RNA sequence: GGAGAGAUGCUGGAGUGGCCGAACAGGCACGCUUGGAAAGCGUGAGUGCCCCAAAAGGGUACCGGGGGUUCGAAUCCCUCUCUCUCCGCCA
């Protein structure tokens, strides 16, 4: 959520940058400012009323102390009207605040200077491409390889739970576990702090990271206990810092954590969601960073090269996209997507998305730090996948297939305990 | 799941209707003292919002969350959440 005072201070610049998303936000921005004006004037009026009734109450107290009961009674009778208008103003204030909030909820983050304008994924900028596409003597899609070597059983998942909840078996399970451990170890090596978060979160956490109130449709909800299954580890790991005031020297804070993720993905069907391409439950290793505003963009670049390093070590071909305004997530100011080449499907698969949210999340989270002047300032938050498991598994299976079997990347062999799947 | 006790500032902990934004202690910051440190002494610190061009200043709200009683609530009532103790159950 943007801060109204920031919008007010720099309205034209905000509007210009928002327009890079391909949608005009002028009217929402104006509404926000008008509502903020209204809020201020109501607040001010209410304060006057309260000040007056506070002073009368004080006088009544003194009169009682002096045993002047009659005079006190006279004053008491004067309070009725004040109470009435106080109550009305309070209601008006609450209503205005709520309206303002609802308007602000609809305004996405302001794209950073470097973000290209554009409406959809076709306007994304291919930032760089790394590696050669493999020349395969056979090219089975991963779902066929899963069946051939009995690695992942989608049908069995349907039986136990439903579509999108696969069962990982034998070397399929071990490959995935190896990847998780390797990702975590690499993260720790790079200076991240490991977190094992809860996978259910309460309502406040959902609001903190922006899934609620608008996007509850994408989360699984347990009504009895009013808990939500996390769509990404970002939710619990970032909410660690909800309502927290950090010290400036604590920054940056760098966390890494593995968790299963749950997404309802209502309405997604078809070829592109086949096999591991889109699931209701999948595993992910996530990195979350909290940064001083001055160096969040440096951290974003570092995250991007960290993720690329993982892909390089696995020997996968990838490209990096700088997302255009229209494709950049609602809360993000700037996002890089990493995509690996799927040799058998002949398409790019998104395996990571690293974003700088600047203060957009921190504002909702009330995540601040005390700067050198002792003033409280919103922290910048960043996060990214490092990495999402299913599509990495899919591309390893597809890109490293040979007639003899699937050759396991060198770095994973100590973790797997085998070097070929056959 | 049953029974009971609680939730106050950075922390501990007073406060049962007006004199309470909140005693006292610790911690923290600054100063004095010291060759340096410790101890000691002194001083100063809450947060949001509103008014004010800004600073100064003022107003208002905040004692777990929400609601109520009252001229007036940290204090009384209702409700929710959380924590602790005992019993039961259990990986």
Image (spheres, rainbow, N blue to C red):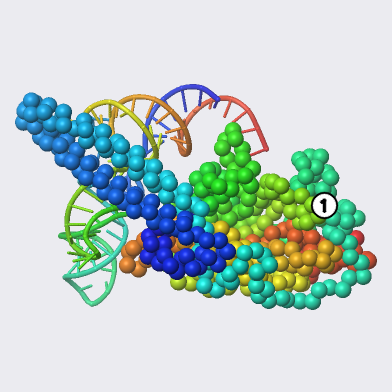
* Residue A163 position in % (x across, y down): 78, 45
Q: Is residue A420 left or right of residue A43?
A: right
In the rendered view, tell whether residue A120 sits above or below residue A216: below
Q: Is residue A328 left or right of residue A7?
A: right
In the rendered view, tell whether residue A113 sits above or below residue A176: below
* Viewer-closest of B67 and A161: B67
Q: Mark 1, chain letter?
A: A
- Would you call the spot at circle 1 few (<14 residues within 10 Å), some (14-19), or many (20 or more)? many
* Viewer-closest of B85 and A246: A246
Residue drawn at the location 50% of the way across and 59% of the way down: A25
**Residue A335 occupies which quadrant of the picture?**
bottom right
In the rendered view, tell whether residue A303 sits above or below residue A267: below
Is residue A173 visible in the rendered structure shown here? no
* Residue A234 position in % (x across, y down): 58, 55
Image quarter where the C terminus of chain A lies is bottom right
Residue drawn at the location 42% of the way across and 45% of the way down: A98
* Viewer-closest of A395 and A189: A395
Numbered marks: total: 1
* Residue B57 position in % (x across, y down): 17, 57
* Residue A59 position in % (x across, y down): 12, 36
Is residue A129 visible in the rendered structure shown here? yes
In the rendered view, tell whether residue B79 sits above or below residue A208: above
Dot 1 falls on a residue whose secondary structure is: strand
Residue assigned mark 1: A152
Residue drawn at the location 49% of the way across and 68% of the way down: A16
Q: Is residue A104 left or right of residue A41?
A: right
Residue drawn at the location 55% of the way across and 73% of the way down: A114
């Amino acid at each position: 959520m943007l801060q109204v005072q920031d919008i007010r201070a720099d309205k034209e610049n905000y509007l210009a940058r928002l327009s890079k998303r391909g949608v005009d936000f002028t009217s929402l921005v104006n509404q926000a400012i008008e509502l903020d004006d209204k809020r201020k004037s109501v607040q001010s009026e209410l304060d006057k009323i309260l000040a007056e009734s506070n002073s009368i109450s004080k006088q009544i107290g003194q009169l009682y102390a002096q045993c002047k009961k009659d005079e006190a009674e006279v004053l008491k009778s004067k309070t009725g009207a004040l109470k009435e208008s106080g109550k009305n103003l309070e209601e008006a204030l609450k209503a205005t605040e709520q309206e303002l909030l609802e308007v602000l909820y609809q305004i996405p983050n302001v794209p950073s200077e470097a973000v290209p304008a554009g409406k959809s994924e076709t306007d994304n900028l291919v930032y760089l491409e790394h590696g050669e596409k493999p020349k395969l003597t056979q090219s089975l899609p991963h779902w066929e390889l899963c069946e051939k070597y009995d690695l992942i059983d989608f049908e069995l998942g349907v039986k136990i739970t439903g579509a999108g909840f696969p069962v990982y078996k034998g070397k399929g399970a071990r490959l995935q576990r190896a990847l998780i451990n390797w990702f975590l170890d690499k993260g720790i090596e790079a200076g991240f702090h490991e977190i094992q978060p809860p996978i259910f979160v309460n309502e406040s956490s959902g609001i903190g990271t922006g899934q609620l109130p608008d996007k509850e449709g994408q989360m699984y909800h347990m009504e009895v206990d009013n808990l939500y299954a996390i769509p990404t580890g970002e939710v619990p790991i970032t909410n660690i810092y909800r309502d927290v005031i950090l010290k400036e020297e604590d920054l940056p804070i760098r966390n890494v954590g593995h968790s299963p993720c749950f997404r309802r993905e209502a309405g997604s069907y078809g070829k592109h969601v086949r096999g591991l391409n889109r699931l209701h439950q999948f595993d992910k290793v996530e990195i979350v960073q909290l940064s001083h505003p001055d160096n969040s963009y440096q951290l974003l670049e570092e995250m991007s090269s960290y993720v690329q390093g993982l892909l390089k070590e696995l020997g996968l071909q990838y490209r990096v996209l700088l997302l255009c305004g229209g494709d950049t997530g609602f809360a993000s100011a700037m996002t890089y997507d990493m995509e690996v080449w799927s040799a058998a499907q002949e398409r790019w698969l998104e395996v990571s998305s690293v974003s700088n949210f600047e203060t957009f999340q921190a504002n909702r989270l009330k995540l601040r730090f005390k700067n050198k002047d002792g003033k409280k300032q919103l922290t910048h938050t960043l996060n990214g996948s490092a990495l999402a498991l299913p599509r990495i598994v899919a591309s390893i299976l597809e890109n490293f297939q040979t007639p003899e079997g699937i050759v396991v990347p060198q770095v994973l062999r100590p973790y797997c305990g085998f070097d070929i799947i056959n």
